[in-house]
């Protein structure tokens, strides 16, 4: 069942979204050579807690950290550890914060120092594909209108969209109905209704869209070892343009 939020609930989600977006921003500022992914995770955890919120990911399904930090060919769900970031890495950070009974969820891929032009372009196309998708996140359209727009933009730029993992509804639960794929034909799936809140999150790869999961049962990597990037925001369907809830408000 798809949850439709009241204005009061949306106001709470805006607060959760601001905390989440600021945690993402903090993580991005920390991405530099010599920093470990565990250090970034600790900073994200401490910031979220300082705001009276809880890290949505910590212990979710057994996940051991507050942020997913995925480097280079890691698509999603990279577990923070002692890994030291190096010049030229690209680093995807996915964060969530639970405040007032609701979650915010967002992600972005950051450059570690100077990166290759190819990596920079992958990050830019991934981010823009989110904005291409949400042009169709309007009342009366269907979920797959977003999906089709993301896929079309990504593939027109020579990349692939991951198909094994998708976006989702978000609210009082971290993952709610409906699923929001980043691929597919337009005109399918549930109709968008004012008050729906969705995590739209393109996961884009340089090569094949095929992935594999490592032995830790969390870390998802590209099957061909090529780079991947990730960009996500929580949005609300309105009477007009969609509202991005995971913004810093500054």
Image (spheres, helix red, strand yellow):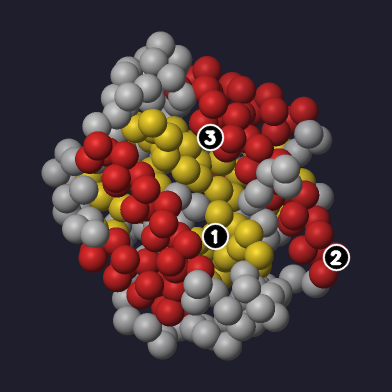
Quarter-wise, where is residue 12 in the image?
A: bottom right
* Local SS, label 2: helix
Q: Helix or strand or loop: what does disc 1 sit on?
A: strand
Mark 1 vs 2, N-terminal side = 2
Residue 100: percent from the left, percent from the top? 81, 50
- Left or right: residue 142 versus residue 75 is right
Measured in 3D between alpha carbons, the distance from the residue under mark 1 to the one under mark 2, in whole angstroms, is: 19 Å
Residue 17: where, in percent of width, then height?
Answer: 69, 50
Mark 1 — residue?
199
| Whether label 3 touches label 2, CB < 8 Å | no
- Left or right: 112 with respect to 169? left
Residue 214 seen by the camera:
no
Are there few (<14), some (14-19), or many (20+) residues within 10 Å of tag 2?
few
Q: Residue, x 49% and y 76% (percent of image)? A: 136
The residue under the point 24% across, 32% down is 116
Q: Which residue is found at the position 58% from the left and 79% from the top?
A: 138
Where's residue 70, x and y in %?
38, 35
- The residue that mark 2 highlights is 8
Q: Nearer the viewer, residue 70 or 176?
A: 70
Task: Bin the neighbour count of mark 1 within 10 Å (Cα to Cα): few under 14, some 14-19, many 20 and up.
Answer: many
Give above or below for 134 relative to 18: below
């Amino acid at each position: 069942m798809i949850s439709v939020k009241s204005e009061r609930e949306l106001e709470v989600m805006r607060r959760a979204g601001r905390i989440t977006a600021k945690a993402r921003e903090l993580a991005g500022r920390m991405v530099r050579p010599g920093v470990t992914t565990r250090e970034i995770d600790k900073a994200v955890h401490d910031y979220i807690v300082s705001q009276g919120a809880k890290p949505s990911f910590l212990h979710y399904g057994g996940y051991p950290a507050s942020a997913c930090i995925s480097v280079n060919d890691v698509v999603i769900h990279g577990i923070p550890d002692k890994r030291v970031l190096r010049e030229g890495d690209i680093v995807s950070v996915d964060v969530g914060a639970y405040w007032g009974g609701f979650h915010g969820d967002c992600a972005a891929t950051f450059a570690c120092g100077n990166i290759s032009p190819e990596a920079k372009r992958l990050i830019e196309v991934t981010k823009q594909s989110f904005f291409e998708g949400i042009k169709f996140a309007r009342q009366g359209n269907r979920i797959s209108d977003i999906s089709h727009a993301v896929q079309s933009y990504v593939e027109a730029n020579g990349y692939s969209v991951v198909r094994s993992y998708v976006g989702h509804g978000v609210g009082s639960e971290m993952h709610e109905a409906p699923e929001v794929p980043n691929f597919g034909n337009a005109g399918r799936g549930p109709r968008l209704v004012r008050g729906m809140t969705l995590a739209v999150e393109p996961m884009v790869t340089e090569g094949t869209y095929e992935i594999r999961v490592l032995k830790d049962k969390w870390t998802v990597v590209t099957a061909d070892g090529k780079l991947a990037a990730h960009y996500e925001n929580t949005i609300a369907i309105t009477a007009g343009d969609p509202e991005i809830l995971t913004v810093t408000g500054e």
